[in-house]
Amino acid sequence: MLCPLHEPVLNVFIAELIDDSPNTSVFFHGVREHTLNFIQPSERPPDANIFEGPPPALIGPLAVNTRLQKGRRLFSGQLKGPESFTADQNGNIYTGTVDGKLWRISNESLTFITQMGRDIPECGTSTDYEPVCGRPHGLRLDRDGHLIVADSYHGLFKVDPWTGEKTLLHSSKEGADGIPFGFLNGLEISKNGTVFFTDSSSKWGRRHVRYEVLETNHLGRLLSYDPVSGRVRTLLDSLYMPNGFAFSPDEDFLLLAETSIGHIIKFWLKGPKAGTKEVVLNNMIGYPDNIRLSEHGTFLVGITTVRFRGRLFPPFLDLIGPYPALKRFIVKLVPLSWYNVLLPKYGLILELGPDGEVIDSLHDPTGSLTWAVSDVFQHGAHYYLGSTDLLFLPVLEEWS
């Protein structure tokens, strides 16, 4: 299949995806038909990955502090892995959890909405049941008040947040360009209603996410879904575990996390650079997850795992990154549960400017409030902090 993203021959308008103004038509800059670079997962060995340098020093805007500890935990034992959030005009907050369930939070009360897959007793007890139970990741409200949900295993859904009625919009089996979706993840809706979303890997599913990070494959995609025509388009391919992303205030670009290599890229949607991408932040202090736009136009990034300098050795992934054979050996022989030993309970979120510059950081060095932050959702004065597996919902009560 052909993806119109790289040199000028086709009249392709990216502005159609993000702007419903009849007078706005912005060409992809430098667009020509080209063959997508997909390789069947079974044919691709792990890739070598060498970071641009040692982890950055914890100075300046990255200086260690305890500002991420100023909060509280809600719904302990009731919510497991509330990964991402959205809210309606009435202040209700919505999230999805590792047991495949969607929830509504209102005045600190919790209401079950629906199960994304089959509702069986084993849901949430083991990641082995996720393909059956479902796993909602990115979710946003459309202009009609319906939840649009990226289920990591099953596809894109529309969900009535009050009745729980589900409609499958596009299945993971159908995928795009002849490649099924392997791991749906981030999701945003542009002002004109177009749904943008990421497929993090065509090889490893969500329950094997650590293998995807270890292997540093570039099998991910950024895609769009037109709710009117039902058409799915590939906007970027060959990405390194594309995860969460956020539009700029004017939707002229988006910032997207490539988690497995610790990059933030800018993908231009309007203007002379439309259709092109550039790395704006690399060699990060940790591995970025979701990116959210703050109320004052900056970008908030959850860091799922920190990457700090060791006293004797570099960080584990820095150490094994250049050696594909070693990574293949580890993936084949080391159980997933063993990786927990390597993950420090250190909470970290970053605030970035429009060019990816680090403006600020909030730390929880002991994990007293949270760690492994997947999302930073600002709602009024509070910040709801996502995770993929924690058994509670951390809420930061102020950005001090």
Image (cartoon, rainbow, N blue to C red):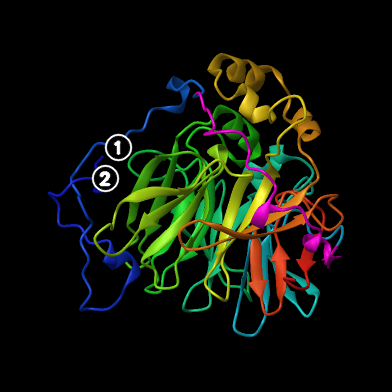
Q: Give residue 104's mark.
A: none
Q: Residue furthest left?
A: 9
Question: How far across and down, in percent of the image, does residue 10 sit?
Answer: 14, 52
Q: Taking the image as drawn, is residue 171 in sight?
A: no
Quadrant housing residue 362: bottom right
Q: Identify which residue is drawn at 27% across, 57% down.
A: 273
Residue 265 in magenta stretch: no
Q: Is residue 54 in the magenta section? A: yes
What whole-number distance in Å separates the C-alpha atoms at marks 1 and 2?
6 Å
Quarter of image, res 96: bottom right
Q: Position of residue 263 (x, y in %)?
A: 51, 44
Q: Quarter of the image containing the N terminus?
A: top left
Q: Which residue is mark 1?
A: 36
Helix, strand or loop at mark 2: loop
Identify the residue shown where x is 53% and y is 31%: 216
Q: Position of residue 122 (x, y in %)?
A: 78, 45
Foreground residue among 111 and 286: 286
Task: Specify whether residue 199 is in view.
Answer: yes
- Say what amino acid the circle numbered 2 marks: Cys
Q: Nearer the viewer, residue 189 or 161?
A: 189
Q: Nearer the viewer, residue 382 or 180?
A: 382
> What residue occupies the far front of the structure in this picture?
60
Examine the rendered structure and indicate whether residue 237 appears above or below residue 310: below
Disc 1 and disc 2 in contact, CB within 8 angstroms: yes
Residues drawn in magenta: 48-75
Amino acid type at circle 1 is Leu
Residue placed under numbered mark 2 in the picture: 3
Residue in the image at 67% along x and 80% along y: 380
- The mark nearer the N terminus, 1 or 2, is 2
How would you rate the neighbour count of disc 1 (Cα within 10 Å): few for under 14, some for 14-19, many for 20 or more? Answer: some
Which secondary structure, mark 1? Answer: loop
Q: Residues within 10 Å of mark 2 (few under 14, many from 20)?
A: some
